[in-house]
Amino acid sequence: MHLFATNLKFLRRKYSWSQQVLADKLKMGRSTIADYERSKSEPSFTLLIQVAEVCQVSVDDLLTKDLLHESYQIIKNRNMKVLVVSVDKDDNEGVELVSKKAGAGYLIGYSDPEFIAELPKIQVPKLPKKTLRGFEITGFSMLPIEPGSIIIASYLEDYEHIDKKRPHIIVTKNEGIVFKYIQDKGVDIQAISSNSEYSAYSIPKSEILELWQYEAYFSFVYPELNTIGRLEKKMDVLLEKLSVD
């Protein structure tokens, strides 16, 4: 019943149900759901039918298929590492969100279907039909795009399709997740900030885990406030320099 346990946990998360919500749907206690997911208890045939109906799968799939891995695609290519993407029942890819909090874990779990399953899925209209992912950025190196903004980016399979006019999300072993304009320099790439106060630097291609090309972004900061804030920062720097002189 190992597959039932993992499938039950996957299906519950797929529908964003807590153990209590699923327990209520099946008219049982939350601890019973927890026992099933830990393989501490085995379900009756009647319960299997109930779970199948509630989760819209067949009993056979519950017991014989690894639904978690079947719900993800593994993309492989020559230059980058493997990429795991979620798909729905119609093979449409999802858009996972990598928040600031999840960023450190992403460097380890980016190719792990179970880690990708934990990432929240977002819906954004009018996006291109590409493999997409959302990343929360930090820092002020890419102004006017503010820290905390969500970058929606499409996956690049190789370095031949780098667009110098578009910024990119670069997932690296040492730098983590960074958002920069990039230029291909052969054995490495040059990462360039839109904020002139930040210097460009090189990243060896051997350190790059994934490349994602900018498609769209959304911010939680009102644009006029962005402008005022940047002017205030520049004024503070100017006043500090004048006071030193």
Image (spheres, rainbow, N blue to C red):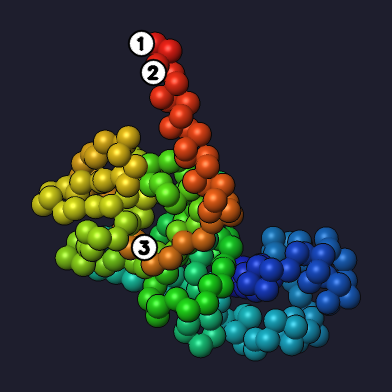
State the residue at coordinates (28%, 52%). Answer: 181
Q: Check contact, mark 2 vs mark 1: CB within 8 A.
A: yes
- Residue that badge 3 annotates: 214
Q: SS class of the residue under badge 1? A: loop
Q: Check contact, mark 1 vs mark 3: CB within 8 A.
A: no
Report the side of 224 relative to 109 (left or right): right
Q: Amino acid at mark 2?
A: Lys
Q: Residue furthest left?
A: 186
Instruction: Residue 23: give x, y in percent of width and height.
Output: 83, 70
State the residue at coordinates (43%, 25%). Answer: 237
- Can I make out residue 8 in this image? no
- Residue that badge 1 annotates: 245
Q: Sequence order check: which comes first, mark 3 or mark 2?
A: 3
Quarter location, residue 54: bottom right
Estimate the spatial distance between the alpha carbons at disc 2 and disc 1, rounded to whole Å. 6 Å
Q: Nearer the viewer, residue 81 or 236?
A: 236
Estimate the spatial distance between the alpha carbons at disc 3 and disc 2, rounded to whole Å. 36 Å
Q: Amino acid at mark 1?
A: Asp
Q: Amino acid at mark 3?
A: Tyr
Report the side of 31 relative to 79 (left or right): right
Q: Nearer the viewer, residue 165 or 16?
A: 165
In the rendered view, tell whether residue 42 sits above or below residue 48: above
Report the side of 122 relative to 30 (left or right): left
Estimate the spatial distance between the alpha carbons at disc 1 and disc 3, rounded to whole Å. 42 Å
Count of picture labels: 3
- Can I make out residue 199 in this image? yes
